[in-house]
Image: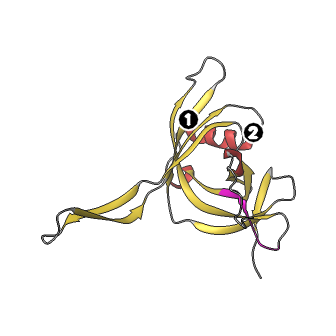
Amino acid sequence: MSDAVKEELVKRSRKVAFMGVVSEDTETFTRMTKFTDFSKSSNPTEYSRQYVDEDGEVTDVTGYSPEISYAFDYYTNNVVHSDIIDITDNEKTGDDAVRNIIIVDFTRPVESQENQYYGKKRPYAIIPDSEGDSTDAYTYSGTLRNKGAFEEVKVQSSDGWKTCTVVVSA
């Protein structure tokens, strides 16, 4: 018998996004539900050159500018939808259109900690694109563009992962 670890397919629902919604100076990371698209592009910056003593070009990655394409069916009483719609409808700019997003990886539990997982937290500028382009539901779409460096965090939840909080180590 082989001692090989069995491979397991990772379902899309195992990497979940939470957006920092600010209310009365408190940021609450709320699960981003009812999204029909949430796909990330790394957008690496490349440095390519050909050295005179080599036959082919060589390339190095010198940076990243990740972005996430989003689309959602508009649901009332959804604080994340309401926040993005407020940015869109009121044409907010600059820091008024920046939100922190945590992508929680439910395939990476924190060792010896119940109900804690690793995630990546990064600020994104919300760049609205279109709305209302479906006859079945009112929809919004756009792009979340990199606004700073990511931070690896540990998160936990006390409400069944409707919201999450960053675990602060003492």
Q: Residue at x 17, y 64 (%)?
A: 55
Q: Quadrant of residue 112?
A: bottom right
- Mark number displayed over residue 141: 1
Q: Position of residue 157 (x, y in %)?
A: 82, 59
Left or right: residue 44 versus residue 59 is right
The image's colouring method is secondary structure
Which badge, 2 or 1, is on the more N-terminal residue?
2
Give the residue pinned by disc 2: 78
Q: Residue at x 20, y 62 (%)?
A: 56
Q: CA distance from mark 2 to mark 1?
A: 16 Å
Residue 109 included in the magenta stretch of the image: yes
Q: Amino acid at mark 1?
A: Ser
Q: In terms of depth relative to the viewer, which is nearer, 31 or 131?
A: 31
Left or right: residue 14 versus residue 88 is right
Q: In terms of depth relative to the viewer, which is nearer, 8 or 43?
A: 8
Q: Residue at x 71, y 63 (%)?
A: 5
The answer to whether residue 25 of the structure is visible from this angle is no
Q: How many C-alpha atoms fall within 10 Å of the one at disc 2: few (<14), some, or many (≥20)? A: some
Q: Secondary structure at mark 2?
A: loop
The C terminus lies in quadrant: bottom right
Q: Amino acid at mark 2?
A: Asn
The span picked out in magenta is 103-112
Q: Residue at x 59, y 32 (%)?
A: 140
Q: Position of residue 17 (x, y in %)?
A: 67, 51
Q: Position of residue 103 (x, y in %)?
A: 65, 56
Q: Secondary structure at mark 1?
A: strand
